[in-house]
Amino acid sequence: MTPDRFRTIVDAYGADARHWPAGERAAALAWAETHRDEAHALLLASAQLDAWLATDAPPQPDAALTRRIIASAPVPPRARAPRARVWWSGAAFIGAGLAGALAGAFVVSFVLLAGSAPLRTTPGATLDAPSLATGFDGTTSDWSGE
């Protein structure tokens, strides 16, 4: 420990050794024991400054000021009831489901009506159109022989 380092520690952390850095505390105390006169002068000046700083207290705010600050604080907006949001989201879900069901019913009925409409053909002509066949129709070809 050098005299300059001891002076720096006392100037930075004060006269109370409990506030000094833990890693340098033992060395600083040992230096103060061996150099009592110089350490005593530095510690006395620092102790007077510490005592003067300890007497300073920040002023407490006035009660009227506190009320004005609280009154001027912004008020958070009221949140809508979550129940209303749930109702609208449920209605939207049901509406989308109904629209899908109606569209599906329309497509199925259109396909069935188009498949069962009588085709205009010449008399005596047979119609063997695989595009109009369904899985429930009898097959027009016999594949058992192959």
Image (tube, rainbow, N blue to C red):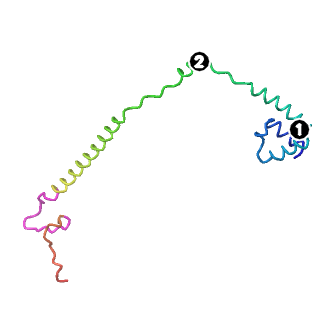
Q: Nearer the viewer, mark 1 or mark 2?
A: 1
Mark 2: which secondary structure? helix
Where is mark 2, residue-wise? Answer: 63
Q: Which mark is residue 39?
A: 1
Inspect the image, locate mark 2, and give the three-letter code of the amino acid beneath it.
Answer: Ala
- The number of callouts visible is 2
Which residue is at a point 18% across and 53% down the rendered structure image? 109
Which residue is at a point 38% across and 32% down the rendered structure image? 80
Task: Provide the residue span drawn in magenta.
Answer: 114-131
Task: Specify few, some or many for label 2: CA neighbours under 10 Å numbering under 14, 14-19, or 20 or more.
Answer: few
User: Of the residues under marks 1 and 2, which one precedes in the sequence?
Assistant: 1
Q: Is residue 74 left or right of residue 40?
A: left
Give the percent coordinates (x, y) of residue 55.
Answer: 74, 25
Which residue is at a point 82% across and 28% down the rendered structure image? 48
Location of residue 43 (image quadrant): top right
Magenta segment main secondary structure: loop
Q: Is residue 146 left or right of residue 62?
A: left
Give the percent coordinates (x, y) of residue 30.
Answer: 86, 45
